[in-house]
Image (spheres, rainbow, N blue to C red):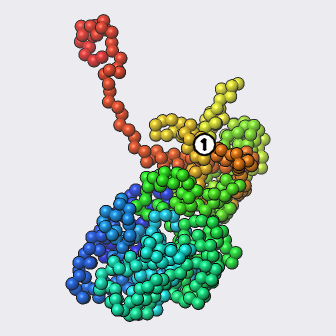
Amino acid sequence: MAVIPGLPTSLETVPPGPAYRDDPTADRRRADWRAWREQMIAYREQRRAACEYSDLQRTIERELCARSRAYFMAVWGTLHEPRRRKSALGDPPFVPFARQVDLLDQLEEALRAEEGDDQDLVVSKCRDVGATWVFATAAVHDWLFAEASIVGCISYKQDYADSADMKSIMAKVRYCLYRLPDWMRPPKTKMRDKTNLIKNYLNGNEIFADSTTADAMVGARGSWALFDELAKHEHGKSAWGGTASAFDTRVGVSTEDFTHGSFFYDLHTGRNEDGHTPRVCPIDWWDNPMNDETWYQRQKKRFAGDPHRFALEIERNPFTNTESFVYPEARSLSVSPAVRFDPNLPQYTAIDPGVRDDCALIFLQENPLTGDIDVLDAYINNGKPADYYGKVLTGDLTGYEFDDHAYRLRSLMQQRYAAKGVYIGDVAGWNQEAATMDSFYSRLEPYKIFVRRDRMHDGEIAQSQRIAKSFRGRREAMREIFPRLRFANTPGASLVLEAFRQNRYRDTDRAVQAEERKPLHDWTSHPVSAMEYFAVNKRLERLILHTALQRPPKASRIKQERWPDSARRYARMNGITTW
């Protein structure tokens, strides 16, 4: 829960944003925050008016700001927003959403921490969530109110460290500082503002800027340092390591990027070679209540010419442009003993049907509160009829010779069958065999297993749409849910995870390749395909929920079938008035 001390009781708790992308309460949460934001804007105006002529109110306000960075940002922070659609209020007030307040809370805890990894903070972010502005505003707060504060602002280019361009960190710092009322800033004679340095002579505090080089920050000392776009720093690893003794706290903020290696990704995922495990506070696009599904789709269209950049900057996926593996992000996942079957959660079974080829059954559950999608287990076999798999799915292992994996899963299958979960599969499972006119899925119906026939809002079968039919559509849908996946410590779930790790593209002549790359058809294809069908189904659910149905057309008498004249005369003679 994000709380801003100093605000009135009715305003101090910031309404939380969506817990995850498909949070069913997302619209209500966004509406709650927008209503709170309007109240906060009114409160800001009230406080500014109260402080305009009252020294007492100014003293009270300075004390409230000194106690809380979040209060300072919410009541006195200002954003630079040149985009017309977002700047209707002129200089937009920096009214934070809950995740931004969390960033400031994490910074405070990091600064208060004793020696150890939790002195540092790493923020993996997407675009348009204001993370850099949060820490720039925090630097101004500390420059004004903290004791013995020196904040370093480090960027991967000098122009991004300090320049007149608003893309630089120091430009953001100055924007916040010089839009404060005069009574909150030191007199001009008590401050110095020059390139790469702003000094407060009233308390000795400083904010300075530097760019990242191999020997960046040599000789520097400070309270905390902000590394902006750390993943893009060519010498980020050496600069981060070289400042360990120079600053009490280091804050690394960045969108994902592997241009100069995986140091930033390894840092916030706990996979760095030094074993350093800092505080981690990721921030996704849905954490910003101003961003909804419509915003996401609009951004996707704007990035249409560069889907890899979209995946990096919006979806926080650093593995988007690797060469050999289809899902290289799978290497960052692992099995967890904490993932267990919960009969109270919605259950799903993803099916890639096959009789002569492999048939993959993946068993999943979804937690609507957290958004977690758990891969519980899996069963894969080949050369078996559909009725065999119907028996496996019900847990009734009679009538066939079953293998050890089927017996291992029997108890789980019986519980899941009783829970009446949802079955999702490839549309190819409806293909009829000429001899029997039966399909794989129709043979499951006697077992009361009905595989979902996904349809779009206009009634067409979903798999006939490009979103599901093309490999690209399935891959995009899968990558949307990848951050939500967890894998149980079971043989089947481990196999699915390994399939994702090993799923590769075909080896083709890249010089003449004109079509999109497609994966090899091997043992990994079937469990991966089953998961992709599940992901497509989740995407289609989202699209259907966000699609407004068209009003039915008005009836046209021109298109109505008219009775013959003889029938009309008969109707009139017998008192029939409707035709």
- Is label 1 in a helix, a strand or a loop? loop
Apparent side of residue 333 relative to residue 550 in the rendered image (left or right): right
Residue 322 image point, x, y percent? 66, 58
The residue to which callout 1 is attached is: 470
Give the residue drawn at x 73%, y 42%: 358
User: Residue 229, located in which quarter of the rendered image?
Assistant: bottom right
Residue 223 image point, x, y percent? 51, 87
**Is residue 481 visible from the viewing direction of this image?**
no
Front residue of this view, candidates 298 and 533: 298
Give the residue drawn at x 31%, y 22%: 557
Residue 410 sits above or below residue 322 on the image: above
Front residue of this view, candidates 11 and 188: 188
**Is residue 566 visible from the viewing direction of this image?**
yes
Apparent side of residue 307 relative to residue 33 in the rendered image (left or right): right
Give the residue drawn at x 69%, y 25%: 434
Crowding near the residue tagged with mark 1, few <14, some 14–19, many ≥20 C-alpha atoms within 10 Å: some
Apparent side of residue 390 relative to residue 451 in the rendered image (left or right): right
Q: What residue type is labelled 1?
A: Ser
Residue 50 image point, x, y percent? 23, 80
- Residue at the extreme left of the image, as rendered: 53
Residue 178 sits above or below residue 147 on the image: above
Front residue of this view, candidates 106 and 402: 106
User: In the rendered view of the protein, which quadrant contains the C terminus?
Assistant: top left
Front residue of this view, candidates 251 and 27: 251
User: Residue 179, located in which quarter of the rendered image?
Assistant: bottom left
User: Residue 64, located in which quarter of the rendered image?
Assistant: bottom left
User: In the rendered view of the protein, which quadrant contains the N terminus?
Assistant: bottom left
Residue 443 sits above or below residue 362 on the image: above
How many marks on residues? Answer: 1
- Residue at the extreme top of the image, as rendered: 566
